[in-house]
Amino acid sequence: MHLKSLTVKGFKSFASATTLRLEPGITCVVGPNGSGKSNVVDAIAWVLGEQGAKALRGGKMEDVIFAGTSGRAPLGRAEVTLTIDNNDGALPIDYTEVSITRRMFRDGASEYEINNNSCRLLDIQELLSDSGIGREMHIIVGQGRLDAMLHAKPEDRRSFIEEAAGVLKHRKRKEKAIRKLDAMQVNLNRLGDLTTELR
Ligand code: ATP
């Protein structure tokens, strides 16, 4: 799976529509301090469904919308589209190219699209769930996060690795199945009691 391009419009410092073509071989983005390098990474996290304003280095979610500068009025909405090359079929959808769009308005309303079709955030999360781009966003390691991972407790570090390997989903399913089995056992015990009483 390869991220092909990112289009940002009204997102943080990107007031005008800007497209970054992420050709194979691009490994870094360089620029002066405050030029918007981290905003590019924030845009990727945001379009993939990030829900925490803090993770996007803001106080509230609306902070992602272009707030205006001395020469340019604030905008009313932010929009990001990430286009993914799906020739290897990493995403379970019958398209060789998949574009994911997220849009947000100042009143807090959000819209999501997969290949220009409206969808729910859940649809995007499910589409990405087996691709290694999990909800916890371990593909994006922010400044300071590396330290946190290195100093994490072994069980927390294990959960990072499990999510990256796609094991976490199966662990959650197993836990759910065990809870169901436990509930079933309680019902069976109750049935046994009733049968004994009726004899
Ligand atoms: P550094 O190298 O210092 O880490 P950077 O290139 O990563 O910098 P960013 O943190 O991506 O820079 O961008 C910071 C810039 O984005 C600041 O100038 C800030 O004013 C601007 N910015 C952030 N949010 C908004 C917003 N909602 N509207 C307008 N500008 C914004």
Image: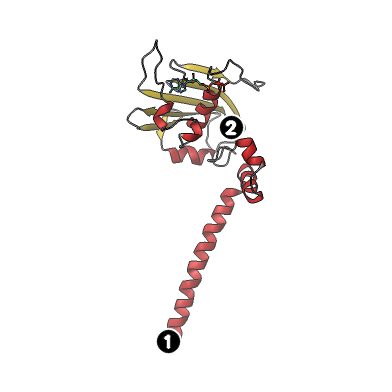
Q: Which of 81 and 150 is in front in this view?
A: 150
Number of other residues with Cα within 10 Å of mark 1, as a class: few under 14, some 14 to 19, many 20 or more: few
Residue 186 located left or right of residue 24: left
Using the image, determine if residue 102 lies above or below residue 92: above
Q: Where is residue 34 in the image (x, y as percent from the top left)?
A: 53, 18
Residue depicted at 45% across the width and 41% down the height:
122
Quick one: quadrant of the N terminus?
A: top right
Residue annotated with mark 1: 197
> Within 8 Å of ligand 1, the CB of disc 2?
no
Number of other residues with Cα within 10 Å of mark 2, as a class: few under 14, some 14 to 19, many 20 or more: some
Residue depicted at 50% across the width and 41% down the height:
126
Using the image, determine if residue 43 lies above or below residue 185: above
Residue at the top extreme, as displayed: 71
Of the numbered discs 1 and 2, the one sitting upstream in the chain is: 2
Q: Where is residue 140 in the image (x, y as percent from the top left)?
A: 58, 33
Question: Label 1 sits on what residue type?
Answer: Glu
- Circle 2: element type: loop
Label placed on residue 142: 2
Q: How many marks?
A: 2
